[in-house]
Amino acid sequence: FNRSIAQDFKDKVPDGVHASTYHALGLKSIMQARGNEVKVEETKNFKLFTKFTDSLADAFKSTATDYRSEILRLVGLAKNVMLDVTGTESFRNLADEYGIDIGDDNESGLVLDLAYKIYKASVEDDATIDFDDMIHWCATGRVEPLAFDFVVTDEFQDSVNSRINMLMRMLRNGGRSLAVGDRRQMLYRFSGASVGAMDYLKQATNARELPLSITYRCP
């Protein structure tokens, strides 16, 4: 999750070991596969929001602007949790799950409609990627991530569904994974971290769970 920690770890590991955040690995995978065909656009979804709201009547545009952060958060969450998007109601359920305010009955229709339209346009965009796409593209197989024989992931309790899917695609045939985490230390639920991330991986890979019963961190 932390680029500076990844860099510090990179300086300590031997040759042949790749150390990075998942986002950095996803970006590297995309650039190796697509090169100059793709550019990073951090404001990708914001620009799509502007595109879809510019033609709205003033009253609707004002409502959309009031809920812009909620709309864009729904779009990012949909990618992170690998939401099965079938229509606007998919985003209503997502808003309910994560406690996102979508307004009253008069406002929620517009909010959900914009979230759906922006999500579809963002996912269909094949020329630009934002931060969420760096993992989402690898998780969905749009680009195959770099492959490894052994993958170690720290802080796995904060993994979102897209990161879990990317991990599964990173493993070569016969590859193995070590996921380190503490179910009681989840910090990234707001960004879509899966409550059952540890248990999901354990079941999907028939993994064996080992305790960390000794700590050297505390005196």
Image: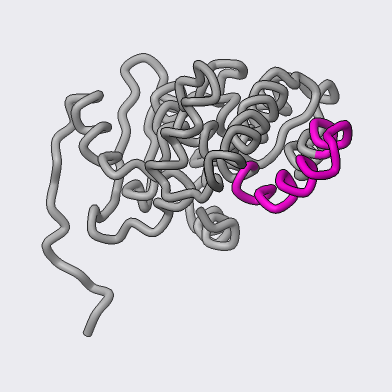
Residue 65 part of the magenta segment: yes
Q: Is residue 156 left or right of residue 204?
A: right
What residue is rendered at 52% in x and 61% in y? 5
Residue 200 x/y as whole percent: 25, 32
Q: Is residue 132 left or right of residue 100?
A: right
| In front of the other: 99 or 207 | 99
Q: How many marks?
A: 0
Q: Is residue 46 left or right of residue 208?
A: right
Q: Main secondary structure of the magenta part?
A: helix
Residue 115 x/y as whole percent: 63, 33
Residue 48 x/y as whole percent: 78, 33
| In front of the other: 188 or 146 | 188
Q: Quadrant of residue 186 in the image? A: bottom left
What residue is rendered at 42% in x and 33% in y? 93
What residue is rendered at 51% in x and 50% in y? 101
What residue is rendered at 59% in x and 33% in y? 109
Examine the rendered structure and indicate whether residue 98 appears above or below residue 145.
below
| In front of the other: 92 or 63 | 63
Residue 36 x/y as whole percent: 85, 25
| In front of the other: 58 or 195 | 58
Q: Quadrant of residue 197 in the image? A: top left
Examine the rendered structure and indicate whether residue 34 appears above or below residue 44.
above
Residue 32 seen by the camera: yes
Q: Quadrant of residue 71 in the image? A: top right
Look at the image and give the residue range highlighted in magenta. Answer: 50-71
Which quadrant, please, contains the C terminus?
bottom left
